[in-house]
Amino acid sequence: MTATLERAAEALHRALGIADDELDAIRARLRRDPNDLELAMFSVMWSEHCSYKSSRPLLATLPTGGRDVVAGPGENAGVISIGDGLAVAFKIESHNHPSAVEPVQGAMTGVGGILRDIFTMGARPIAVLDALRFGDPSSTRTRHLVDGVVRGVGGYGNCVGVPTVGGELVFDPSYEGNPLVNVMAIGLLDERRLMRAAAPGPGNLAVLFGSTTGRDGIGGASVLASATFGDDVAGVTRRPTVQVGDPFAEKLLIEASLELVERALVEGLQDLGAGGITCAVSESADRAGTGIAVDLDAIPRRESDMAPFEVLISESQERMLAIVRPERWSDVREVCERWGLPVAIVGRVTATPDVAVVEGGIDADGSPSGDARVLARIPTAALTSDAIVHHRTSAPPTRRRPAPAPAPTTAEGETLRVPADSLLPERGMDPGAVLVALLGSPNLASRRWVFEQYDSNVGANTVAGPGRGAAVVRVRGTRKALVASTDAVAGVCALDPWLGAVLSVAEATRNVAVTGARPLGVTNCLNFGDPTRPEAFWQLSEAVRGLGDACRALGLPVTGGNVSLYNESSSGAILPTPEIGVVGLLDDLETLVRPAFASDGDAVVLVGERVPGLGGSEYGRLAGVAPEDGPPSIDLDAEGRLQAFLVDAAARRLLSAAQDVSGGGLAVTVAEMAVWGSRGARVRIPARHTAAVELFGESPSRAVVSCAPRHASAVVLLARQHGLPIAEIGRVGGPRVVVELVDSGTTGNAEERGSTVADAIDVAVEDLARAWEAGLPRALGLDEEGR
């Protein structure tokens, strides 16, 4: 009989995703065998999603402090002061695996969860950005997922009243079986009302308010995010684990929570997400060095006959845990009931640092009442700060890109490779056809079909919404604005994860700086494969190293984020994807620089140095450049000087428009500025590298700016003061975009040069706009109306 029970226990822990060595570690922490309920609690708390058991040592190397940092990693969201007694809270998180199973609900609950992380800090959510990655846009599965995720993000944000102001949509075959749904949220708060997710004060009440607890989401984020998908990814075998969101309940939860914080009625506040009640009570208690006794019978439920483990690990959405002094209970109850939210006392804070689950009631000190039974008792630290850490084996892949990157070559005689399905096949293999093809490609075309399904203006604070660079949201009652962007250079990460992470940070921060805003801090969502594979863990390790190096070089704190591992399916692992979210501050909204060409006759100026390398680029994707060609390198010092120049030039009001050079390279940047401004430009580029590198290479630390002719000399002087290469390359105006490559030995302004043209682009702005607008619907098989 004893042997049979031992085999049953072993089967249970493995079924819950607990490895044999982890079971041994649990026994060591408890100094006994765990019971079934305790095993279930450990299974969610020691999951990758909750414990970061594979990544915690890596994350400890990141820079997290700074003069203006109010709250950093370890809290629900990072918080940075923006002056005048105000602070911004922001964070990005993943909901990849639930969205792969049930795209609408997976995306909805991803938005709901990240919003709760924001208002848990006492901040009112003011904006959402969604960074989405899918497989081949022509596949039936991808189209199903894109449609469902977009409806989920839009449906939740639109109903809850928080604008979706920006983000990304990227396609790559590696995401076919495992899409990425990363959502970033931003909120504003009065620094004096900053709320912590802690449970201080033995004798205080643990109060649960919001939606009732059901079986939906049991093991959802915590278990799905800690396992590799098999062939049943889209089947019903996994669907019951996906949470179900209710944005209308979330709206009530936001208002009730912020009122409780404003009236100082709560001592601590924690949302219930992955791990459910178990996670909320254990993390809150451990942060305060206390314990919590949970009264199982007091937890409001919407389903009968729920087993204790189901109640404790359910991830039912729209729920909050508040720590309340007994004398304030009546006021807390009144607020929740007025907002139409169920509310109940479900436990007590205890001096003994344990999480105890009691059936039959608890007394005022948290001890079991009368004949009540203790179903589980676990040291809080064992579930949280003392959770197991795995020191994984790391090994680079056998094939790595050659180093250094290929040396520069001359542009003379260069023949550009053009996609076979060019949108202008009748023009042959000229660079103009490549430009049109790139603008109409799935990863660079207009995202209008997506963002028109989102309410990007609710709240009336959105200054610049999705579709044209970074998002801009005004800080009501001030002259300030917040600028936000997300980015991940996953194509380069596949070749060199350190460089890819560095480029991701550089591009996301540059997207903010190009508006004139000063980047404040970084949040990250690290999407990688199975960490038990040495190559996958090496990718993660190198990316974290790159993230830290870039943030230190740019003087930015990492305020928090999320690690999403096991992003693999039967078809293989995703591209390593370190998604970076950045928030910046514009001190005076009047200095905002937009990306569209503004006036005919303006000077067009290129700031920054080109370097060779086409690996990981959109041109490489379309034209078939081999990965061995190598990605471009980056000089982080030059990147910092470029961003400082952009902020400085905007503050001096020298610029009419600015856009960073990134996806598609310089030619695409000029074309985008022309399309968005409905006016053309003629530019001449001194060529030192191949035509493909000059026109379509994505070397970083560059920007195209335009300015009134009277400001051109001041812009050039300012760039040189920042130690940056700069060249006036053309003028805004006319109905066409003309880009010429000229001999790099010529001197003087571009318009004065008469050297031989090596290659040229000459395309009507109207044709560029048509390709840009039609690209995504065409890729997804939609008609002109987007259906």
Image: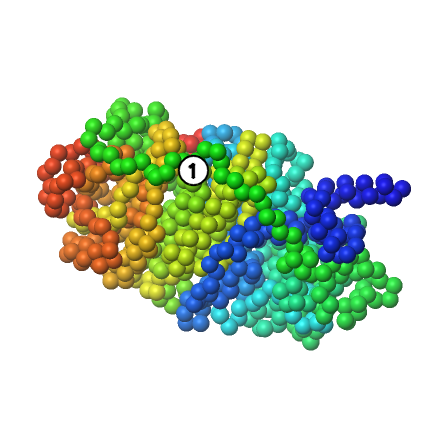
Rendered location of residue 171, percent (x, y): 45, 36
Rendered location of residue 239, percent (x, y): 65, 39
Q: Quadrant of residue 519?
A: bottom left
Q: Quadrant of residue 97?
A: top right
Rendered location of residue 6, percent (x, y): 82, 43
- The mark tally for this picture is 1
Q: Left or right: 233 with respect to 425?
A: right
Q: Residue at x 57, y 38 (%)?
A: 533
Q: Residue at x 24, y 34 (%)?
A: 409
Vertical relation: 322 (above or below) 774: below
- For this rendering, which residue is in front, 700 or 749? 700
Residue 638 visible in the shown view: yes
Residue 134 visible in the shown view: no
> Mark 1 = which residue?
495
Q: Left or right: 669 with respect to 171?
A: left
Position of the N terminus by quadrant:
top right
Q: Residue at x 10, y 43 (%)?
A: 752
Q: Residue at x 50, y 49 (%)?
A: 525
What is the three-letter code of the residue carrying label 1?
Leu
Figure colour scheme: rainbow
- For this rendering, which residue is in front, 197 or 535? 535
Rendered location of residue 737, percent (x, y): 22, 38
Vertical relation: 779 (above or below) 252: above
- For this rendering, which residue is in front, 746 or 343? 746
